[in-house]
Amino acid sequence: MNAPFRGVSLEDKYRQLGGYVDLAGIQALVRLPLDQIRRDRSGGFNTGGYSPGYRGSPLAGYDQQLAQAGTFLQSHNIVFQPGVNEDLAATAVWGTQKVGLHAGARVQGVFGLWYGKAPGVDRSGDVLRHANMSGTAPLGGVLAVAGDDHLAKSSSLPSHSELAFADWEIPVLAPADIQNVLDYGLIGIALSRYAGVWAALIANSETMNASAIVRVDPERLRIVLPADHPDPRRGRDLNRLPLLQY
């Protein structure tokens, strides 16, 4: 007996909850906040997402892909707002980590996803340094996506952001393929929530402009947090909610 035919849609790349999907690198970055909200909801947490930034190669099409996925973002309580520049976008993300400090918040936390080309990382250094030192909320977290251009393909000078992030004490994750983009993004947000710092994800043209079959099963990625280290935010205002366990 033949198996029933299941219709295939271009929206499967964001809608499908298990199995395998075909994703471009930029689309993996769009799916990332959707999967984070899904993980939070499965854990019983009411969170939101906020993604501002400033486009530039190799992230030139990211804002377009986010805009096209607007229906999915809205249904998952994620706000996409292109920044006037990288500095203002990073400052806005900084503010998302203060949601729990005021009465009347409609969510338990908001995670931020900032994006910008490597020169935007350079110009936003003061904001990134201070925002990182200010800390992140246990149910918030921030992932800074840096579009690096090692070969100066579309830049006046070769660029890479690892040393800048290291100087600001922001841990860096460098995905080698598109599966890594999705997995490392989720790990980076979990790291940010646990350690109370921003986390960075390096994006380059080799991954952002490629496509691959990616596994999206919820059970694929199990993040285990250390249980024997105190929360660095203990006793501070940002430590009003428990850490999210997966």
Image: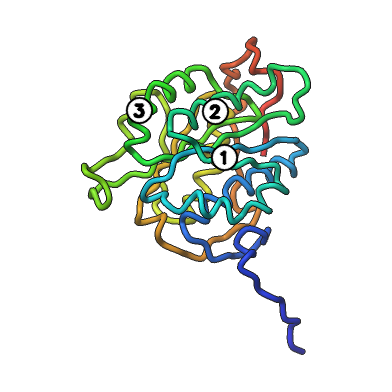
Q: Could you say whether the residue bearing mark 1 is in a helix, strand or loop? A: loop
Disc 3 from disc 2: Cα separation: 22 Å
| Mark found first going from the N terminus, 1 or 2 | 1
Depth-wise, is mark 3 or mark 2 nearer the camera? 2
**Residue bearing mark 1:** 81
Q: Nearer the viewer, residue 133 or 103?
A: 103
Above or below residue 110? Residue 74 is below
Q: Amino acid at mark 3?
A: Ala
Determine the image quadrant of residue 234.
top right
Q: Nearer the viewer, residue 51 or 206?
A: 51
Q: Amino acid at mark 2?
A: Ala
Question: Mark 3–mark 1 contact, CB under 8 Å?
Answer: no
Q: Could you say whether the residue bearing mark 3 is in a helix, strand or loop? A: helix
**Residue bearing mark 2:** 92
Question: Mark 1–mark 2 contact, CB under 8 Å?
Answer: yes
Q: Nearer the viewer, residue 80 or 125?
A: 80
Q: Residue at x 60, y 62 (%)?
A: 13
Locate residue 226, reporting x and y percent: 58, 29
Numbered label attached to residue 166: 3
Disc 3 residue crowd, few under 14, some 14–19, many 20+, Cα 10 Å? few
Q: Residue at x 51, y 36 (%)?
A: 143
Disc 3 from disc 1: Cα separation: 27 Å
Q: Residue at x 60, y 45 (%)?
A: 33
Q: Could you say whether the residue bearing mark 2 is in a helix, strand or loop? A: helix
Disc 1 residue crowd, few under 14, some 14–19, many 20+, Cα 10 Å? some
